[in-house]
Image (cartoon, rainbow, N blue to C red):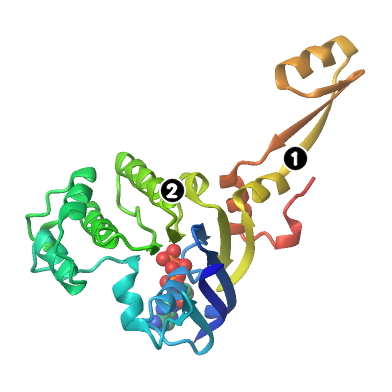
Amino acid sequence: MSVIQVQNLTRDYGSGKGIFDLSIHVDSGEIFGFLGPNGAGKTTTIRHLMGFIRPQTGRCQIDGKNCWEKRDQIQKRLGYIPGEISFFDDMTGREFLKFSLDYRKIKNENRMQELLERFELDAKGKIKKMSKGMKQKIGIVAAFMHDPDILILDEPTSGLDPLMQNRFIELLEEEKKKGKTILLSSHIFEEVEKTCDRIGMIRNGRLVTVDSVETLRSRHMHTYTVRLDTPEEAEAFAKDFGGICHTDRVTVTAKQGLEEIFMDYYGGKPDDSVDFV
Ligand SMILES: Nc1ncnc2c1ncn2[C@@H]1O[C@H](COP(=O)(O)OP(=O)(O)OP(=O)(O)O)[C@@H](O)[C@H]1O
């Protein structure tokens, strides 16, 4: 069953900018990766889902609720990391997190404390004096600490160092095991490859492809035939490269890496010209 649904959503900012007739869905317990180059329309889509923007046409629903009409309920219930983190700068990190807990009437601070420790964050200082990575960590703690069953994460690891990116991937894996439904926008292939069940790619406000990670990979198998001088050389080659040997010819099948597949789409290659073998 789809928990998150975007149906024929359009927001036309003029000059070809915006999102156009976009439809995606995220099923219960699924992690959906939402990928696309800068300016593709990921944040615009996510802001509609959070009820910050009213659709011009089309609609967004979360758990059967219209995201615009029920935006107060949606915003209170979901875990959300915005693409650009801007908090009440004059607060300390801890004051902000306390404020977020109070907004949701949560008294128990155990999960907050656990997340602060996991991300090695000292939240006592003023937010305005924090580095980008520290602010991002505050955003992560704020999104996960009320244990939401639905999360919308807009480039959640931007500004995090590789160690912390890995900690974040571990957190996502744990949340997935708990059955959470997650929409994740990202530029980090490893993060998407490790955590997502399906991937939707958006370019110029339009959906280019939606597929499972496995299907994307298997669609991009490349087969090469190499001809050697003698059958003996062919046999030695096949042994080294894992190919299949037919007299002096060897057939080798290679999988295109997920990063390369994305680059094909990112680079503006039309959908039907991506190589399939
Ligand atoms: N309020 C607005 N008014 C006019 N144009 C806008 C507005 N918001 C976004 N846009 C334009 O719509 C397009 C999509 O922007 P959006 O922020 O959704 O992209 P994105 O995929 O999240 O990009 P990034 O990866 O850079 O964060 C861009 O061309 C952007 O300039």
Which residue is drawn at the image coordinates 25% and 60% (left, top)? Answer: 139
Q: Secondary structure at mark 2?
A: helix
Compared with 65, 209 (above or below) is above
In the rendered image, residue 100, in percent from the top left (x then y), is placed at: 18, 68
Q: Residues within 10 Å of mark 2 (few under 14, many from 20)?
A: few
Relative depth, front residue between 91 and 12: 91
Which residue is drawn at the image coordinates 23% and 46% (left, top)? Answer: 119
Which residue is drawn at the image coordinates 66% and 45% (left, top)? Answer: 217
Residue ID for mark 1: 222
Residue ID for mark 2: 177
Relative depth, front residue between 85 and 7: 7
Query: Where does the N terminus fall, quadrant-wise?
Result: bottom right
Q: Residue furthest top?
A: 232
Residue 230 visible from this viewpoint: no
> Is 26 left or right of 157, judged from the image as shown?
right
Residue kind at label 1, given as amino acid type: His
Residue kind at label 2, given as amino acid type: Lys
Compared with 140, 50 (above or below) is below
Which residue is drawn at the image coordinates 50% and 90% (left, top)? Answer: 56
In the rendered image, residue 125, in percent from the top left (x then y), is placed at: 7, 56
Q: Residues within 10 Å of mark 1 (few under 14, many from 20)?
A: some
Question: What separation in Å lies between label 2 and label 1 (alpha carbons)?
Answer: 33 Å
Q: Quadrant of ligand 1?
A: bottom left
Relative depth, front residue between 78 and 56: 78
Q: Which mark is residue 46?
A: none
In the rendered image, residue 186, in percent from the top left (x then y), is placed at: 44, 57
Number of numbered discs overlaid on the protein picture:
2
Relative depth, front residue between 145 and 106: 106
